[in-house]
Image (cartoon, grey):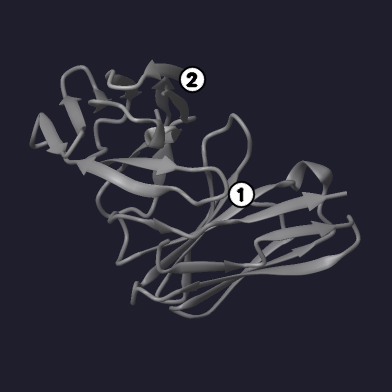
Amino acid sequence: ETGVTQTPRHLVMGMTNKKSLKCEQHLGHNAMYWYKQSAKKPLELMFVYSLEERVENNSVPSRFSPECPNSSHLFLHLHTLQPEDSALYLCASSPSGSETQYFGPGTRLLVL
Amino acid sequence: QQQVKQSPQSLIVQKGGISIINCAYENTAFDYFPWYQQFPGKGPALLIAIRPDVSEKKEGRFTISFNKSAKQFSLHIMDSQPGDSATYFCAASRTGTYKYIFGTGTRLKVLA
């Protein structure tokens, strides 16, 4: 297992719920990432934070709201999601940009 | 120009055989090419990576072959084992950016 942890590991939510995904990295890295992984599609980069500043936002719908309070923690706040948002959400970290990214185990999200 | 095309989608190999997965890219600015291995229920883990200044990199049973002129790179798994059964992703990125462009993945099954 890597030094990136994610909670919860599984989440079922209704379309009107609000929930948050949490990621924590214990590697001393400066950059953190959120990815969405759906079946038979490439991993989709959602957000990138470097030194707690958002440096990338890949046209993600506003129902996904990231938060990076410090370089070790990253959150993804979810509200009024759609069933097509059901996927595995992966967090990753790297020492800086363009270096090896280390992934957490993911949160399996099901939106009913 | 941002795509990375990966093939095959799935691969079945006998124990002891060679597994070969191919990727092709278009953007000549890419200069870092990692391969990730993902087991069910886990996040992707870095397997091996290469930069375009070398044509081959070997780590144990895993070898990356890189053809800069053809804009292709491939992963070879020698003496494939049932424990290698997983999904493999290639990726490409450019120094100075935070973006990895991932392939769609290859599901490898090694028969005992």
Kind of residue sitting beneath label 1: Ser
Mark 2 to mark 1: distance in Å?
30 Å
Where residue B63 sits: x, y (%)?
19, 31
Q: Secondary structure at mark 1?
A: loop
Q: Is residue A46 left or right of residue A77?
A: left
Q: Image point 36% across, 56% down: which residue?
A: A101
Per the image, the residue denoted by label 2 is B10
Snapshot quadrant of residue B58: top left
**Residue B34 in the image: x percent, y percent?**
29, 42
Q: Compared to B21, does A20 lie above or below?
A: below
Q: Name the residue located 82 percent from the left edge and 50 percent from the top edge.
A: A111
Q: What residue type is disc 2 on?
A: Ser
Rendering coords of residue B92 (x, y %): 33, 38
Classify residue B31 as left or right of residue A35: left
Near-viewer residue (A37 or B43): B43
Residue at image mark 1 = A59
* Circle 2 SS class: strand
Q: In the image shown, does B99 or A4 lie closer to the viewer?
A: A4
Is residue B32 in view? Answer: no
Quick check: B100 left or right of A43? Answer: left
